[in-house]
């Protein structure tokens, strides 16, 4: 009898020990604490939308204002400019096409963008290098063409690409150099491969199947009413809601807009937790795989970053403009994920997102600062 009692006690103890400690965490309290430093002060514009994925479920937490002048508060359906987080849609489309045998990461971009076959070093750049920031191309063309003034039209961009010359610090496949120009070129390559506009490809292959009805490029009139007002770091309005900004001026080259509810769906799919979407999730897993090691704690996938601090590995992507700060990330082993959308510029969304993941995982080490950079020039 004593032996039986001891055995039952031991089994119960083992079962209790097996219950993850993080099941006891107060998610709402953690999120509120971590976002507190970026909440606007009295009279300043802006707000924050957070989605947390944990234990196979999603929770939403919203703070501040989508539009101060209209007294409209942030909700899970408020629509934000994603900035560079939108790059994930191009690399997901690329990974899908690779999985379906429709193209290869090793294909030269000039195979599809035939205007570049008249160029020089651009002909050596592959689709995989464009998607992993290893093409050698600068962040924006003006860093190479210092004389250029104004935005880049498509003919301007082709001229730049065909004239671009590699050098030891800008050699395709040899180094990590964050490049908006490369990601925009990837969109064009996908358009040419499938003879379909990028926005239509995104809808047909990702947002439509996932039911992401609040995600678009550009933002259509029927969604403008839910678009947030963007604000400067000091809370001053910048541009009208839904405005496309940036260096490149042709259809499909602008920023993608979405809500925290939609991005939570995208997050769940990337975590492999959406039933009925296995082929897409397999493609997403391919996009997450590191293809270039920047340093022992930072590896680059197809737009996704793989960063490690302490015992926690996070796969994530950040973004920003003068009037938006965004983050999406997850810890695959712990099955934890978070989306942070802020309608103010330079609000350290990456650090906040990683802090939330560390707190939820009860990881004591400081979050990584790798891959943060300065995304405010998307």
Image (spheres, rainbow, N blue to C red):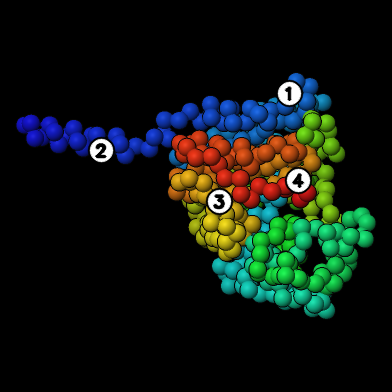
Instruction: Name the residue that disc number 1 marks.
Output: 41
Q: Residue at x 66, y 64 (%)?
A: 175
Viewer-proximal residue among 170 and 239: 170
Gap between marks 4 and 1, in whole Å?
A: 21 Å
Going from N to C along the chain, the mark reached first, 4 or 1, is 1
Nearer the observer: mark 3 or 1; the answer is 3
* Callout 4 touching callout 1 (CB < 8 Å): no
Gap between marks 4 and 2, in whole Å?
A: 49 Å
Whether residue 93 can be seen here: no
Q: Residue at x 56, y 67 (%)?
A: 99
Q: Is residue 351 above or below residue 69?
A: below
Viewer-proximal residue among 179 and 368: 368
Going from N to C along the chain, the mark reached first, 2 or 1, is 2
Q: Residues within 10 Å of mark 3 (few under 14, many from 20)?
A: many
- Quadrant (top left/top right/bottom left/bottom right) for the N terminus: top left
Q: Residue at x 73, y 59 (%)?
A: 179
Q: Residues within 10 Å of mark 4 (few under 14, many from 20)?
A: some
Q: Is residue 10 above or below residue 374?
A: above
Gap between marks 2 and 3, in whole Å?
A: 32 Å
Q: Secondary structure at mark 3?
A: strand
| Disc sitting over residue 14 in the figure | 2
Nearer the observer: mark 2 or 3; the answer is 3
Q: Is residue 250 above or below residue 115?
A: above
Q: Residues within 10 Å of mark 2 (few under 14, many from 20)?
A: few
Instruction: Name the residue that disc number 4 marks.
Output: 376
Q: Could you tell me residue 211's position as x and y percent? A: 61, 48
């Amino acid at each position: 009898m004593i032996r039986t009692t001891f055995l039952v006690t031991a089994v119960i103890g083992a079962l209790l020990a097996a219950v993850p400690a993080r099941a006891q965490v107060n998610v709402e309290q953690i999120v509120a604490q971590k976002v507190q430093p970026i909440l606007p002060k009295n009279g300043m514009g802006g707000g924050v939308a957070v989605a947390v994925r944990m234990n196979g479920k999603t929770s939403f937490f919203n703070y501040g204002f989508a539009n101060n002048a209209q007294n409209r508060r942030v909700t899970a359906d408020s629509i934000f400019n994603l900035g560079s987080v939108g790059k994930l849609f191009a690399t997901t489309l690329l990974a899908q096409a690779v999985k379906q045998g429709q193209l290869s990461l090793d294909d030269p971009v000039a195979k599809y963008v035939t205007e570049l076959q008249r160029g020089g070093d651009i002909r050596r750049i592959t689709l995989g290098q464009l998607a992993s920031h290893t093409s050698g191309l600068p962040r924006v063309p003006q860093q190479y063409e210092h004389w250029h003034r104004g935005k880049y039209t498509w003919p301007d961009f082709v001229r730049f690409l065909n004239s671009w010359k590699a050098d030891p610090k800008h050699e395709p496949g040899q180094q990590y150099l964050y490049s908006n120009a490369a990601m925009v070129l990837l969109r064009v390559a996908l358009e040419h491969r499938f003879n379909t506009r990028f926005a239509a490809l995104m809808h047909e292959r990702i947002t439509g199947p996932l039911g992401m009805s609040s995600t678009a490029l550009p933002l259509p009139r029927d969604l403008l009413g839910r678009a947030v007002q963007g604000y400067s770091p000091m809370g001053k309005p910048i541009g009208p809601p839904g405005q496309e900004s940036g260096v490149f001026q042709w259809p499909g080259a602008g920023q993608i807009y979405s809500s925290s509810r939609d991005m939570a769906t995208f997050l769940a799919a990337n975590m492999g937790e959406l039933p009925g979407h296995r082929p897409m999730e397999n493609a997403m897993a391919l996009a997450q795989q590191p293809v270039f090691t920047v340093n022992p704690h930072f590896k680059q996938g197809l737009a996704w970053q793989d960063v490690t601090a302490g015992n926690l590995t996070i796969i994530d992507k950040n973004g920003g403009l003068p009037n938006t700060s965004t983050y999406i990330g997850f810890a695959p082993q712990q099955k934890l994920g978070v989306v942070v959308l802020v309608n103010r510029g330079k609000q350290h969304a990456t650090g906040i997102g990683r802090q939330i993941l560390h707190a939820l995982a009860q990881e004591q080490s400081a979050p990584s600062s790798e891959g943060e950079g300065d995304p405010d020039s998307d």
